[in-house]
Image (tube, rainbow, N blue to C red):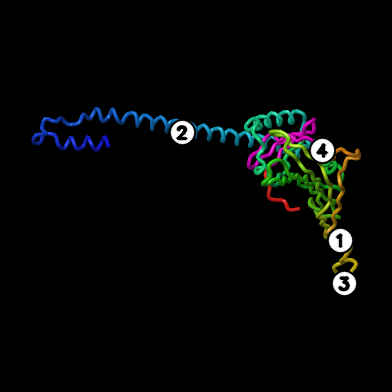
Amino acid sequence: MALAFASSLRVAAGKGPLCNIKPFNSNLTATIKLPTQSKFSCSATLTTDRTQGFQASEFDLENKKHSLLNTIQDTQRGLVATSDKRSEIEEALVSVEGYNMGEPINLEELDGTWRLQYTSAPDVLILLEAAARLPFFQVGQIFQKFECRDKSDGGVIRNVVRWSVPTLLEEQEGATLVVSAKFNVVSVRNIYLQFEEISVQDINISEALQAIIAPAILPRSFLSLQILQFLRSFKAQIPVTNPNPGRRSVGGLYYLSYLDRNMLLGRAVGGGGIFIFTKSQPLHL
């Protein structure tokens, strides 16, 4: 409106009875514009600064995550980590944990399958050490599978270990050990695990064993086919219960120290070790 009014006055200036009307003062127009321009410039500067600050923070975080993953390389998931290496890993871990420390657990983001990249937990290192020392035992990939989508206070967690017995079962993934537990969110970053069941499933026997049970050069009998089918569909389940009546099952406190779309860091409360996971493809059990 101010611009339109000023324009009409300029056209009228110098004609007929309106010749005494002086053109609209351009300086006044500039005076009216300046506050608006100043606000826009200030707002744009603040928005740019915030965007650049956010991008810098994200870039710094990704660098720290990359540094953490580089630090745990060549440790065989923690099996051969020296005390100096563990200290270095702890330092890199803490630098990542600080980014969303204190934020509530996002169960929707937690839901899914996570692959173990490193741990200092004794119960896991025992398995890795046994596989390294015993020629008849192998440990493949280890996962944590969270089932908590559309939940608000907990869900189910499954600790999954792929293992094998060479020559009898397929390499690395001959069988699957699953330790299932329910979990409840007990504080901002802590969950309590209540273990329920241990199962062995997905038995994949080797071709050599299949040939012994049902030789390919001979007609396969009904019995041999039944044995093969039994082994393939075998599933042993052992409930985990507390022997003391009235008390809940064996459990433990787990601190989820960092979580985003592709990394999960955790600490077993009470000196149970640290865990570093990365997001994996969905695991169907």
Task: For marks 2 and 1, give the CA distance.
Answer: 65 Å
Q: Amino acid at mark 3?
A: Pro
Task: For marks 4 and 3, give the CA distance.
Answer: 51 Å
Task: For marks 1 and 4, give the CA distance.
Answer: 33 Å
What element does badge 3 sit on? Answer: loop
Q: Which residues are magenta?
A: 252-277
Q: Is residue 270 above or below residue 158?
A: above
Q: Position of residue 264 (x, y in %)?
A: 68, 39
What element does badge 2 sit on? Answer: helix
- Give the quadrant of the N terminus: top left
Please tell me whether the stretch drawn in magenta is mainly helix, strand or loop.
strand
| Quarter of the image where one finds residue 58 | top right
Is the residue marked by circle 3 packed among few (<14), some (14-19), or many (20+) residues within 10 Å? few
- Mark 2 or 1, closer to the camera: 2
Is the residue marked by circle 2 packed among few (<14), some (14-19), or many (20+) residues within 10 Å? few
Q: Is residue 178 left or right of residue 149?
A: right
Residue drawn at point x = 74 percent, y = 37 percent: 191
Q: Point out the tag, 2 or 4, that comes first from the N-terminus.
A: 2
Q: Amino acid at mark 1?
A: Phe
Q: Which residue is denoted by mark 1 in the rendering?
A: 230
Q: Is residue 121 above or below residue 157?
A: above
Is the residue marked by circle 1 packed among few (<14), some (14-19), or many (20+) residues within 10 Å? few
Task: For marks 1 and 3, give the CA distance.
Answer: 19 Å
- Mark 1 or 3, closer to the camera: 1
Q: Which residue is denoted by mark 4 in the rendering?
A: 251
Q: Point out the tag, 2 or 1, that comes first from the N-terminus.
A: 2
Q: Is residue 211 left or right of residue 58?
A: right
Along the viewing direction, whichever of 174 and 112 lies nearer the viewer:
112
